[in-house]
Amino acid sequence: MANKAIVGEKLGMTQVWDDDNNVVPVTVLRVAPARVVQVRTPERDGYSAVQVTYGHKDAKKLTKGLAGHYASAGVEPGVRLVELRLDDTSEFAVGQEIGADTFEPGDSIDVTAVSKGKGFAGVMKRHGFAGQPASHGAHRVHRKPGAIGQCATPSRVFKGVKMAGRMGGTNVTTLNLEVVRSDPDQQVVLVKGSVPGPKGGVVFVRNAVKGGATEGAS
């Protein structure tokens, strides 16, 4: 699991130039300072994580339970309350701020977000099927999946068969991306390449937990 994480908002894509004057496509993430509301530990909660909020919201617009949660922690209410799962939370305290300076240029990260919803899609778009023959008697079946089950035995379709259905709108994690620039003053982080989700979507960034992890990563 990770030992560093932040939450941000996807603003879109642009490009920057590196030291060798090569164009680098980047995704711009707005990372407002996140305030720690609660620290979860394995001894008390069964897992380790930090509960954070970001932005600002009038306490009068919250439910009484949520407003009381912020009040008991002594933290100003934010627009959203999220948890960042971490290996070790001993260095975090309630009220502490986590910002864009958590990561530095060159760090290897994993980014998680809800992918764009694409609605109902066929098997060729959703699963990459090749489709049926374009000629030789094929009649209006060019994009259909073909047989999906068996005959009399077992006379049913097994669970998990790839078929047409709703595509997108699921949690997607892109591994081993690179931080190109981190600017806490402007509250932005530039990530090389694309990340899941639409513009304005919430993204979770953690240090890479598989190959390519940087110093300090587990």
Image: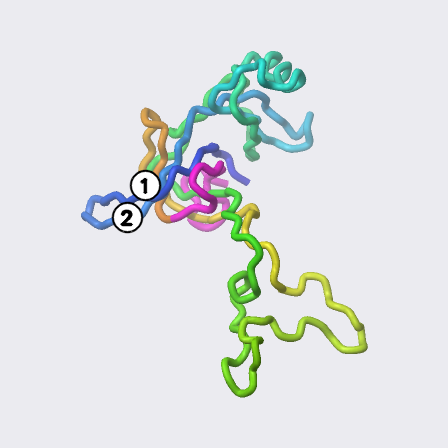
Horizontal arrangement in the rendering, residue 67 relative to residue 201 (left or right): right
Q: Is residue 181 above or below residue 120?
A: above
Which amino acid lies under the numbered mark 1 shown in the image of this protein? Answer: Val
Q: Residue furthest bottom?
A: 136
Which element type, helix, strand or loop, lies under badge 2? strand
Kindly identify the residue that appears in the image at 62 percent across and 26 percent down. 40
In which quadrant is the N terminus drawn? top right
User: Which residue in the structure is indicated by mark 2?
Assistant: 24
Residues 49 and 15: in front is 15
Residue 160 is marked as none
99 over 95 or under it: above or below: below
Q: Which residues are magenta?
A: 194-218
Q: For label 1, count other residues whose C-alpha is less than 10 Å away and answer few (under 14), some (14-19) or many (20+).
A: many
- Residue 154 vs 4, above or below: the answer is below
Instruction: State left or right for residue 158 relative to residue 55.
Output: right
| Residue depicted at 51% across the width and 63% down the height | 125
**x and y, in percent, of residue 204 in the image:** 49, 37
Q: Are marks 1 and 2 in contact (CB under 8 Å)?
A: yes
Residue identified by numbered label 1: 180
Residue 36, how many percent across, how many down? 53, 22
User: Is residue 9 rendered magenta in the image?
Assistant: no
Task: Report the Cα–Cα distance between label 1 and label 2.
Answer: 9 Å
Quadrant in the rendering for residue 37? top right
Dividing the picture into quadrants, the one containing residue 144 is bottom right
Whether the magenta-drawn stretch holds residue 215 is answered as: yes
Residue 150 percent coordinates (x, y): 74, 75
Q: Amino acid at mark 2?
A: Val
